[in-house]
Image: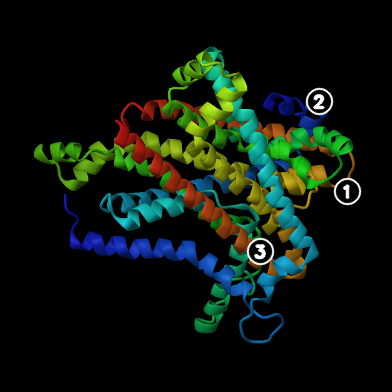
Amino acid sequence: MVGAFQDGDGRPTLGNLDALTSDAALSALKGSLVLSATTALIGAALGALLAYLVVSLPSQSLLRRTTLAISGVLAQFGGVVLAFAWIATIGSVGIVTKAMSDVLGVDIYGSGWLFDLPGLVVVYAYFQIPLMVIVFAPAFEGLRPQWREAAVNLGASTWDYWRHVALPLLTPAFLGALLLLFANAFAAYATAAVLVSQGQPIVPLLIRQAITSEVLLGQANVGFALALEMIVVVTIVMVAYNLLLKRTSRWMR
Amino acid sequence: MTPTRTFKVVRAVLLLAFAAYFFVPLIAMLDFSTQARGSTEGRTWDNWQFMVTDEDLRSSIIASLLLALFTVVLMVALLVPTMVWVRLRVPRARGLVEFLCLLPLTIPALVIVVGISNVYSWVTYLLGDSPLVLTFAYVVLVLPYSYRAIDAALSAIDVATLAEAARSLGAGWFTVIARIVLPNITGGVLGAAFISVALVMGEYVFASLLHFDTLPVAMAGIYRSNPAAAMAAALASMLFVALLLVGLTFLSRDRHRHDQGAS
């Protein structure tokens, strides 16, 4: 059944692939890559921090279980609702915007940055951080206290322990999670579609323009070519992810 | 290692900061959705009532709920017999089935839309243009999640023995699946259903690009004319989905507890 749908996928001629090197397509690809990389890095760093904070709580703590449950919900959270939530927060009449201008006299809305790439970074972080927490918390939980005790017994300071034991163990898991977040941001569409109404800063929006355009006919095939481009990027990321996953599973049992 | 006092303070501050980042937008939505229209002061629930009174919004909510229902029914009807059959008769095909089911997870939804937009022009031609035809696409979309939930439940029971016992007592394959296996994996099926409903309620990519009026599409449309009502609908759907997902975590926790009790 899945296969049947994939058959409908574009069989692009070389002409459509040429469209990929147009200025619009290249800048959209660049925008997408920058956006995905930035949000993956921010999400991974903050998510790892939050995961560490949560895991350092006692394992029966209510706060710990609630945070993990909320993360599970928020990581699935996206699309139209998320876009609305941020418009209500830092849109032109959002509560934070109003509070800031009332109290501090600062205009954080500016010239509408929320509706362009920088805004997307803030908004995407909202689901990237929780995703990182649920992906990465098990890695922290896998760090056995015995390893730390062993290191301390051998005369290691806290810094030595993190530098020589914990970080090397966590690195593959961290990189793997980073790739997962990258693919997640790269594939996201709905939030951006609602927020960004002018211009096509990222590939998914360019595809929307290509397949829904009423001005230019025959753009659908360009959409296929762009979709192919997305598949290529995601495939590369996923292959790398699987390689890292194999390496991670050596220690995280 | 007991955490030091400084660490505890820093941890509390950081956790509060994260909580603010995650909850302020939700509170902002609530605030926005209860504002009276125009420049009048005060609070009102009119925007929440709009969900019931507005024709378009109401029909889109009904469409989304029906879609969720049909998707779940079709998903269970397809997935459970297939997975039981594969487990019992063709274990070699298991890897293939797993690969096919997890495939939609790695391909961006947008790419699938681009791929099936041609297929859908035929589907709408044959079956009419009710949003409910999206069921077929959504079943594919929820496959990865449902597969995992049902697979975990099936692994926990001894399907082969159950099926052989039932068969030797004269049960047909339909009876085996519907009356023997299904009651034993209720937890997994319920979990799969919850996550499917959650996904379908929030799905925007397929519906908007194929031009069907489901709830998220209607919300995005109404936002232009009546932002507050759109916010109210968005918050309501978000709460509904959150409830389902929290229920899901409780379901899986209960299952773990049972497992531990049995072993």
Name the residue type under label 3.
Ala
Question: What whole-number distance in Å separates the C-alpha atoms at marks 1 and 3?
Answer: 30 Å
Both on one chain, marks 1 and 3?
no
Chain ID of residue with mark 2: A
Residue B158 x/y as whole percent: 43, 22
The alpha-carbon separation of the residues under discs 2 and 1 comes to 22 Å
Q: Name the residue carrying label 1.
A: A214
Local crowd size for mark 2, using a 10 Å CA cut-off: few (<14), some (14–19), many (≥20): few
Determine whether B101 is above or below B207 in the image: above
Residue under label 3: B233
Q: Amino acid at mark 2?
A: Thr
Q: Residues within 10 Å of mark 1 (few under 14, many from 20)?
A: few
Q: Is residue A248 above or below residue B35?
A: above
The answer to whether the residue labelled 2 contacts the one labelled 3, judged by CB atoms less than 8 Å apart, is no
Which residue shows up at 49% across the image and 15% down it? B164
Left or right: A168 in relation to B26: left
